[in-house]
Amino acid sequence: MFVLPTFSFGVVASPTTVPETFDTATLDNGGNGAGNDNTLTFTVNPSASISAGATLTIAGLTGSQTSDNASLTVGGAGAAIFGSSADWTQSSGTLVLTVAGGQSVPTGSDTVITFTLTNPATTNAGVTGITLASSGFTTADISGTFLNAVALFNVTTRDTEANILASTPTNPSGEVNIALGTDTGYYYIYDGSAWYIYKNDTNFNDTLTFPIIEVFDNESDFITDTGADDYTIVHAKDTDKLYVWTGVRWATYNQN
């Protein structure tokens, strides 16, 4: 009896699709003052263009005071690609950017946008581990620290010079007190034991007493300064000359 040979065929596997990647995926933090607005700059360059209707999701920006907003304003040169808005979720710190109709995120060049979140109300170290995801792409890790808040100070004392110098404020640990003289326009810094005066219109040292000579590397560092006290003497290393401020102009004296 003749038997026909039989053949078996394995299961043919479907082709494997290799995920695309983000050639550029960066986020730059803006201002870090506690409670202040913080404008972040996002830059992306995908290995393949991303079409209208697709989304890009930035996740992990927790800690912001900005409430949920389905239409958070997006700015920057690439804002129109996303319809100039994004969907923000406060609890997860997630920003979803949807590519607008008729638009695409191009490949081969950077797309740059900005968006603004409010920093935490109190000082903190910020967040790391931010990610960028989009369908068909390998999730990218975005390096950096974001929404870190530092304490800012304001000049809270504004008084006459006499009243400022007569006061002895208590400094917080590791900090100084700063005052502004309403009659002089000078800044006064109290280091815990004494006031130091800083003029805001001159680079001369107010702690010097005549006839101490101030030394500058270059004549150009002071020659246009008109805030010196009368008869201030300066030596310029580049010219090897002495300069005396007469109250009206600098008088120059050659040493030879």
Image (cartoon, rainbow, N blue to C red):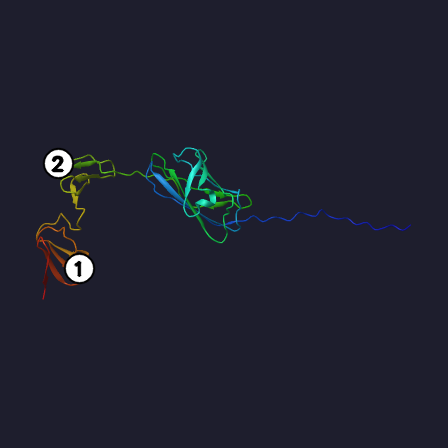
Q: Nearer the viewer, residue 16 or 52?
A: 52
Q: Residues within 10 Å of mark 1 (few under 14, many from 20)?
A: some
Q: Is residue 60 above or below residue 104?
A: above
Question: In the orientation shown, which residue stands out farthest toward the front?
Answer: 102
Left or right: where does residue 123 sit relative to residue 104? left
For the residue labelled by badge 1, is the local secondary structure a helix, a strand or a loop? Answer: helix
Sequence-earlier tag: 2 or 1:
2
Left or right: where does residue 162 sit relative to residue 138? left
Question: In the orientation shown, which residue stands out farthest toward the right?
Answer: 1
Residue type at mark 1 is Glu
Q: Which mark is residue 163?
A: 2
Residue holding disc 1: 219
Residue 190 x/y as whole percent: 18, 40
Q: Which mark is residue 127?
A: none
Residue 191 x/y as whole percent: 19, 40
Residue type at mark 2 is Asn
Q: Is residue 199 above or below residue 155?
A: below
